[in-house]
Amino acid sequence: GLIVSGLMEKIGLPGMELRTWWLNLVAHAFVAFAGYFLFGGLRLLREPASGGAEVERAPLERAHWLTLAVIAALVGGVIFAKVQIGMAAFAGAVVLSLCNGYLGYVDLPERVAQGRGEARHTYLGPGLLEALQAGVQVPR
């Protein structure tokens, strides 16, 4: 709000913030719908699904529920408690990193060995952990 108002006044367009926002919304919506229709759009919705792999829906684990709870707390804190969103998001990321047993985005070796965690869902799979461990080992 304040930054936009200041910038709009600086470039000689005071009071045009809302109009500029709406024009941007219309332009982005136009591009989005044009792309949708250009790449198949309604035809894709009318065709029955065919091909593709059958995907087994796995139940949500504790880590997933905790992630959803942190996101809900973040949104609620920003809306109702006027919490600063950047710090709240950073704090939520720290909580999730510590509670979910992650080292960044790589599962701990125990979780990979048990066939649990996110490594079994990733494109690179559990082999990523071994590759990263081999890459960071420094010869003596």
Image (tube, helix red, strand yellow):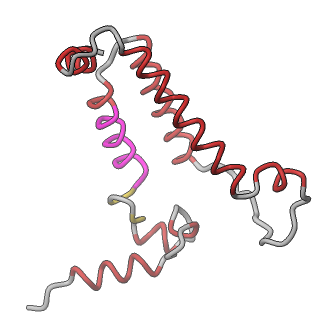
Instruction: Reply above or below: 112 against 3.
Output: below
Q: How far across and down, in percent of the image, does residue 57 sit?
A: 74, 57
Q: Which residue is drawn at the image coordinates 36% and 36% (left, top)?
A: 92
In this picture, residue 134 sits left or right of residue 100: left
Question: For the view shown, which residue lies furthest in the front direction?
Answer: 12
Position in image of residue 70 (x %, y %): 45, 33
* 4, 116: nearer the viewer: 4
- Give, as a single range, the part of the protein colored magenta: 89-101
Res 26 → quadrant:
top right
* Residue 90: quadrant of the picture: top left
> In the image, is residue 38 part of the stretch drawn in magenta?
no
**Relative to 50, is 98 above or below?**
above
Q: Is residue 97 magenta?
A: yes
Q: Is residue 48 above or below residue 27?
A: below
| Residue reaching furthest to the bottom | 140
Q: Residue at x 48, y 66 (%)?
A: 111
**Quadrant in which the N terminus is drawn:** top left
Q: Position of residue 40 (x, y in %)?
A: 76, 57
**For the stretch drawn in magenta, what is the main secondary structure?**
helix
Q: Is residue 89 left or right of residue 115?
A: left
